Amino acid sequence: MELTFVTSNEGKFREAEEIAARYGIKLKWKKMSYLEPQGSSLEEIAKLSAEALSEELKEPFFLEDSGLFVEALKGFPGPYSSYVFKTIGNEGIVKLMDGVENRKAYFLAVVAYFDGEKVQIFTGKVEGEIATEMRGDRGFGFDPIFLYGSKTFAEMGDEKNEVSHRRRALEKFFSSIC
Ligand code: IMP
């Protein structure tokens, strides 16, 4: 079975490709960016993005929207993760968290699948903590500051794919269609 994953992020595609292979699914990479409408939740943004894109692509595809939610920052950056990463980045988050005791955070991934008729949503979450400094050189985005146990996602390399928010959302999606 083949499925099209629309994303401009190579890191996301490689992770998804590996997870899909376990279900005997071959992923085709449609490398493009798409308009992400403003919304109060990732679920809403992913659904609206997929509905808008379905008008253009007409064929089945899925996309995936993720965000980092920091408890002490009341869920920030959440739906603004992409903008925050591009502006203040990992150093900025570490600075915002300077001296903050509660370091709990989670990643949320929302997969939006357009099956040719309608959009379905699948979510996955992984809990961890914000590190006090950037560590590791693998992965992408906020991986160097996201601690899962004693290692950051950027130190875990392929092990990240066993436990990540992306894996949890994709597993729900793939098992629903296989
Ligand atoms: P988006 O899903 O591409 O909108 O991602 C929002 C922001 O979160 C971007 O800056 C990504 O780099 C970052 N991000 C998404 N997924 C991950 C992940 O698995 N690890 C670390 N950062 C991520």
Image (cartoon, helix red, strand yellow):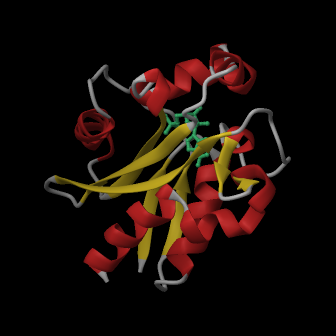
Please give the count of numbered marks on the rendered protein.
0
Question: Horizontal placement of 49 versus 149: left or right?
Answer: left
Seen in the picture, residue 59 relative to 51 is either above or below; the reply is below
Residue lying at 26% horizontally and 49% vertically, measured from the top left: 58
Q: Position of residue 122 (x, y in %)?
A: 29, 58
For the N terminus, which image quadrant?
Answer: bottom left
Q: Position of residue 171 (x, y in %)?
A: 40, 72
Residue placed most toward the observer, 178 or 28: 178
Residue lying at 55% horizontally and 66% vertically, measured from the top left: 163
- Residue 89 lies in quadrant: top right
Tell which residue pokes out farthest to the left in this image: 117
Seen in the picture, residue 114 relative to 35 is either above or below; the reply is below
Residue placed most toward the observer, 98 or 29: 98
For the C terminus, which image quadrant?
Answer: bottom left
Question: Horizontal placement of 20 versus 58: left or right?
Answer: right
Residue placed most toward the observer, 18 or 139: 139
Question: Horizontal placement of 66 versus 152: left or right?
Answer: left
Residue lying at 54% horizontally and 60% vertically, measured from the top left: 164
Q: Position of residue 22 (x, y in %)?
A: 53, 83
Question: Horizontal placement of 58 versus 15: left or right?
Answer: left
Q: Position of residue 128 (x, y in %)?
A: 56, 50
- The quadrant of the rendered image in which ligand 1 is seen is top right
